[in-house]
Image: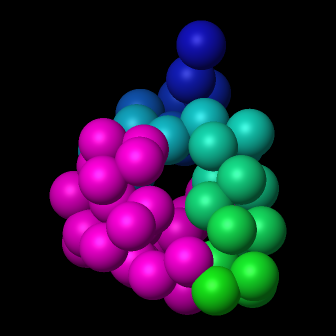
Amino acid sequence: MHTEAELNDEFEPVDADECTEMRLAAEVGYTVEALSTHFEFDEDTVRHHLNGRCSHY
């Protein structure tokens, strides 16, 4: 289930758990491309969350 802010984000809806998982994986060295493939999100969506511009942070 996604919050209103998650659904109104300009990128694909990503829930807080997925956002946290992407951030932690990036900290240990996973690339944007690898995260995009694993989570099945566009690379722009992944970058948006890794840069902290999402509604979760």
Q: Which residues are magenta?
A: 30-57
Name the quarter where the C terminus is drawn: bottom right
Which of 51/9 is in front? Answer: 51
On the picture, is 42 further left or further right than 15? left
Q: Residue at x 75, y 82 (%)?
A: 28
Q: Residue at coordinates 64% horizontally, 78% vertically from top-left? A: 26
On the image, the x and y values in percent for residue 16 come to: 71, 42
Is 34 on the left or on the right of 1, as rendered?
left
Tell me, yes or no, if residue 45 can be seen here: no
Near-viewer residue (53 or 44): 44
16 relative to 49 in the view: left or right: right
As displayed, is residue 16 above or below residue 9? above
Q: Is residue 52 magenta?
A: yes
Residue nearer the viewer, 49 or 7 = 49
* Quadrant assignment, res 23: bottom right
The answer to whether residue 34 is above or below residue 30 is above
Q: Position of residue 45 (x, y in %)?
A: 33, 63
Q: Quadrant of residue 42?
A: bottom left
Look at 39% across and 77% down and name the residue there. Answer: 32
Nearest the camera: 27 or 5? 27
Residue 16 in view in this figure:
yes
Does residue 12 appear left or right of residue 38 in this picture? left
Quarter occupied by residue 10: bottom left
Q: Is residue 36 magenta?
A: yes
The extreme top residue here reads 1
Q: Residue at x 38, y 67 (%)?
A: 34
Q: Quadrant of the N terminus?
A: top right
- Counting labels gives 0
Colour scheme of this structure image? rainbow
